[in-house]
Amino acid sequence: MSRRRIDSPIGALCLTESDGALTALAWDGDGADETPLLLEAERQLREYFSGRRRDFDLPLAPRGTPFQTAVWNALREIPYGEARSYASLAAAIGNPRACRAVGMANHRNPLPILIPCHRVVGADGSLTGYAGGLECKRFLLDLEAKNAGGKPPAHMME
């Protein structure tokens, strides 16, 4: 397992790589490894934060239950600069009554930003919990809205 800490506009982030894929992105931790994948992930994250990247092209290997994996896959389908409610995400995975379980899967997402759980908001468009804090979530949504071509703020769903 290799780890790399990087500085970002939302604070220090720590990337973890195992067996040639990213397995975690956390708001704490140390690491100074310089594997090709960790360096590429750092480059892509810098591009994202500068507004030059909308999608990540990195091998990801989050570990979770089949339900969590289904939710995380659905998160990756939410377009840059847009947001969805927990209910719409539950419907997207074919389980419209699983809003709370979707929320818990979001909470356990080991690769935030790369798997964009920040794009999920309350049914009324309000910001809800986020592992990095609500200010971080607001920053990410506003960053994407600003770079998405003048759309309304992402945390106000269409």
Image (spheres, rainbow, N blue to C red):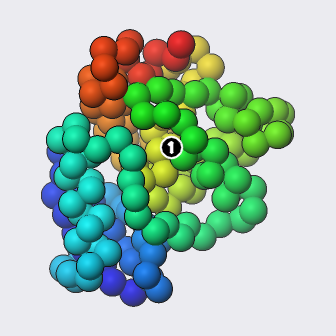
56 in relation to 17, above or below: above
147 in relation to 109, above or below: above
4 in relation to 49, above or below: below
Q: Amino acid at mark 1?
A: Cys
Residue 48 placed where, x, y %? 26, 45
Q: How many marks?
A: 1
Residue 132 appears in the rendering: yes
Is residue 104 rendered to the left or right of residue 14? right
The image quadrant of residue 40 is bottom left
State which quarter of the image contains the N terminus: bottom left
Residue 78 placed where, x, y %? 54, 36
Q: Residue at x 68, y 43 (%)?
A: 102
Residue 21 placed where, x, y %? 45, 75
Q: Residue at x 26, y 82 (%)?
A: 35
Q: Which residue is mark 1?
A: 117
Q: Residue at x 28, y 73 (%)?
A: 38
